Amino acid sequence: MASTIIPRRTQIWQDPRAIALLMAASLTTMANATISPALPGLERLFGGDPNAGMLVRLLVPAPSISVAIFAPFAGLVADRYGRRRMLLAGVILFVIAGCAGLFLPDLPTIFASRLVLGVAVALIMTAQTALIGDYFTGDERNALSGLQISARNFGGLVFISLAGWFAAISSRLPFVVYCVAAAFLPLMWQVIVDPQRTSQAPGARQQDSAPECSSWGLVFAVLVLLQAVTNMIFFVIPTQLSFFFEAAGHSNPVMTGSALGVLMLSGGSLALLYGRVQRAIGYVGVFALGYGAMALGFVLLTLAAAPLAWFAGAAATGAGYALVSPSFVTLALRLAPLRRRGTAGGVLTASVFIGQFCSPLLSTPLVVTYGYATLFHIASSLAAAMALAAVLKACAMGIQALKRRDRNDGVPSCGETRARSRSEC
């Protein structure tokens, strides 16, 4: 799937297509966490259900299960039938399934609506990722990949705060927040189009030059695995921080909300600079810096005993995650052949939510057996190991560059060799 490159005269954030894609990105954080402030009220509202305690707690991760299952299939559909219809259908389904909790009569049906919401998120994220690759290249793609992380963070901060105010009025009212997605539809309908499958202009060059080599799938699989592990490490913060604070004697929910707000603000702010940082230090440098910041954040949670230091740890973790996350998208879009971008976007989307879903399953037994200090030590060690691997990769690349330069300095070029041979003759 290719199209002709059109010279760009505007900043990336002024492009209506980029704005529409950022709107879509802001919905992904809303999907899971928006109803978190309403959970205690929903448990009381449906207290007659013997499974209320379990079902209420499953309402938040339920969309992740559907995304992990359906996103790869959504990628195949996007490659076959196009991205526009998938994105618009996903947003419409998002509004319907998200708002359904306002009217559904019991917890099992609300839980079912949350699973359907996950299908909508799979459609949206898969189409959005593929469209970033279709519409933009090079520095613009890098910048937009960073901006979408900012949109997720700032959107999540606004939507969750709004849901908290609504939850103080009624436990069902936070479901109204999902109606916001309907306001995004007119712009998406107007500006999102499927690019031409073949270029019609004579001599036009492809929008991207991703090589369709036999080894791209293996490299892509490593990238997907790394993203899943990254999200598994990062999601320790939103899933365990409130319990960590409570164990430390700070049970006020305001403190947890403030810490998560700091995490989102730091991540969203740093993601705005991703394009510049990536140009300055490259992908390997971004991974080294990002994973190093995540490791520092968990170290602060482990060693510090003051809330201010915990907030700094949350900020460092959020900033590090915001640095590495856009690189997965941009590298995957460079690796995947044009006709496989939808599939690549679907698998990438699934890996994010698989990591998030596995995080509490693995971290909770560690907390029960060894405590929070051990959990944070393991998380910081994993992040530090990945940062070290990036540093070693950078060193290896530097050595190879020096060797190539030395060879070039000592060996004459082909033109020089031919000239020398003619003169000797």
Image (tube, helix red, strand yellow):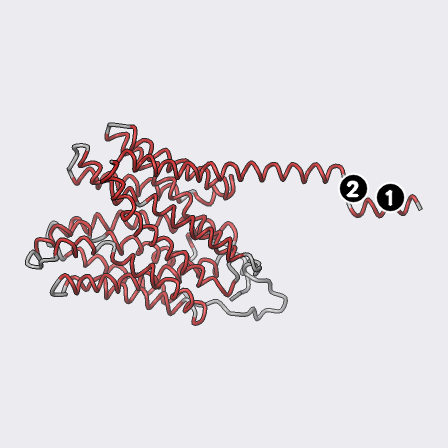
With respect to residue 130, does 325 lie above or below? above
Q: Is residue 238 left or right of residue 190?
A: left
The answer to whether residue 100 is visible is yes
Q: Which mark is residue 222?
A: none
**Label 2 to label 1, Cα distance in Å?**
10 Å
Name of the residue lying farthest toward the left: 48
206 and 210: which is toward the camera:
210
Secondary structure found at label 1 = helix
Image coordinates of residue 365 in percent, x first then y, are 25, 43
Task: Report the amino acid beneath label 1.
Answer: Arg
Decide: few, some or many residues near mark 2? Use Cα within 10 Å; few <14, some 14-19, many ≥20.
few
Q: Mark 1 = which residue?
A: 420
Please count the marks in the image.
Answer: 2
Image coordinates of residue 320 in percent, x first then y, are 39, 40
Decide: few, some or many residues near mark 1? Use Cα within 10 Å; few <14, some 14-19, many ≥20.
few
195 and 423: which is toward the camera:
423
Give residue 79's quadrant in the image: bottom left
Give residue 83's quadrant in the image: bottom left
Task: Report the amino acid beneath label 2.
Answer: Pro
* Residue occupying image coordinates x 14% and y 65%: 104
The answer to whether residue 16 is visible is no
* Residue occupying image coordinates x 28% and y 43%: 363
Give residue 263's quadrant in the image: top left
Q: Which mark is residue 412?
A: 2
346 and 27: which is toward the camera:
346
Secondary structure found at label 2 = loop
Residues tagged 2 and 1 counted as in contact (Cβ below 8 A): yes
* Residue occupying image coordinates x 34% and y 43%: 233
Image coordinates of residue 325 in percent, x first then y, are 41, 47
Image coordinates of residue 59 in percent, x first then y, are 20, 56
* Residue occupying image coordinates x 29% and y 35%: 374
Of callouts 2 and 1, which one flags the residue occurring earlier in the amino acid sequence?
A: 2
